[in-house]
Amino acid sequence: MKILLLILFITINLYGNIKQKMLSQYQDKEYKEACNLGFNHFSEYSRDEEYISLYAFSCLNADYIDRLSVPIAKLKYSQESRFNAAYFSIILMQKKLLYHAMLDNYDISSLNLPSTDHVLSKVFDLYSKLKKDELKDVYIFEDENDNQLKYKLYLLKDDKIDKMIIEEFYNSISVKKHIYW
């Protein structure tokens, strides 16, 4: 009986430590590490919507957008979880549509999707306002709320898979580079 209690105690502490470690990494802006930790222990927490949301936000901030599909399906039991699932769904859909538009010349100008504060949403909205005759290889967009913030959108052709690049610039200084496929 004592051995069973000891195993149970260690297991509870181990699981609690994983969740706490992921939260600490997220708070320290170690998004890639938090996303990978969450991914590695996802099956252990597959019913914990707080954990799933933390994992998904970590992956979102690490630009691992494709990892959002499983959390989107799992987040359904609380109002906050459903809101998070809808938020992640919008960003994932905008990424897929923007990539499709850039690679395949798919017209997204008629789409009227919700927007978010994520860089993909902002660039998606700006790109979708372009006229068909404005298509080019590189786009420079100015943020609608801050004229010092600019986004450079282009494709990086590769032998394996073409990548969609969004670079953020503030006062002409590179702030962040996002790479999606």
Image: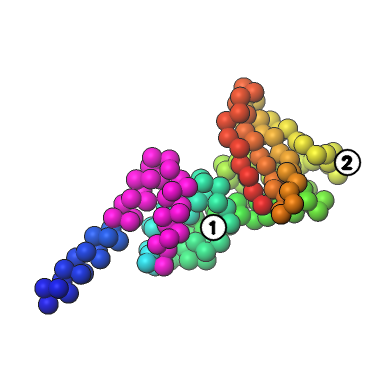
Picture mark count: 2
- Residue visible at 49% across and 61% down? 71
Q: Residues within 10 Å of mark 2 (few under 14, many from 20)?
A: few
Task: Name the foreground residue: 111 vs 2.
Answer: 2
- Nearer the N terminus, badge 2 or badge 1? 1
Q: Which mark is residue 4?
A: none
Q: Secondary structure at mark 2?
A: helix
Q: Is residue 97 visible?
A: no
Q: Which mark is residue 68?
A: 1
Q: Residue furthest bottom?
A: 1
Question: What residue span does the magenta drawing correspond to?
Answer: 17-43
Task: Name the foreground residue: 161 vs 41.
Answer: 161
What is the magenta segment's predominant secondary structure? helix
Q: Is residue 31 magenta?
A: yes
Task: Name the foreground residue: 132 vs 180.
Answer: 180
Q: Is residue 40 left or right of residue 123?
A: left
- Residue visible at 81% across and 53% down? 104
Vertical comparison of 126 with 110: above or below = above
**Residue 58 position within the rendered picture, expressed as x and y whole percent measured from the top left:** 46, 49
Task: Name the foreground residue: 50 vs 7.
Answer: 7
Q: Residue furthest right?
A: 133
Q: Is residue 85 left or right of residue 40?
A: right
**Residue 125 position within the rendered picture, expressed as x and y whole percent measured from the top left:** 69, 43
Q: Residue furthest left?
A: 2
Kind of residue at disc 2: Asp
Kind of residue at disc 1: Leu
- Residue visible at 25% across and 66% down? 11
The CA distance from mark 2 to mark 1 is 34 Å
**Residue 159 position within the rendered picture, expressed as x and y whole percent measured from the top left:** 74, 52
Residue designated by label 2:
133
**Residue 35 position within the rendered picture, expressed as x and y whole percent measured from the top left:** 46, 52
Where's the N terminus, which quadrant?
Answer: bottom left
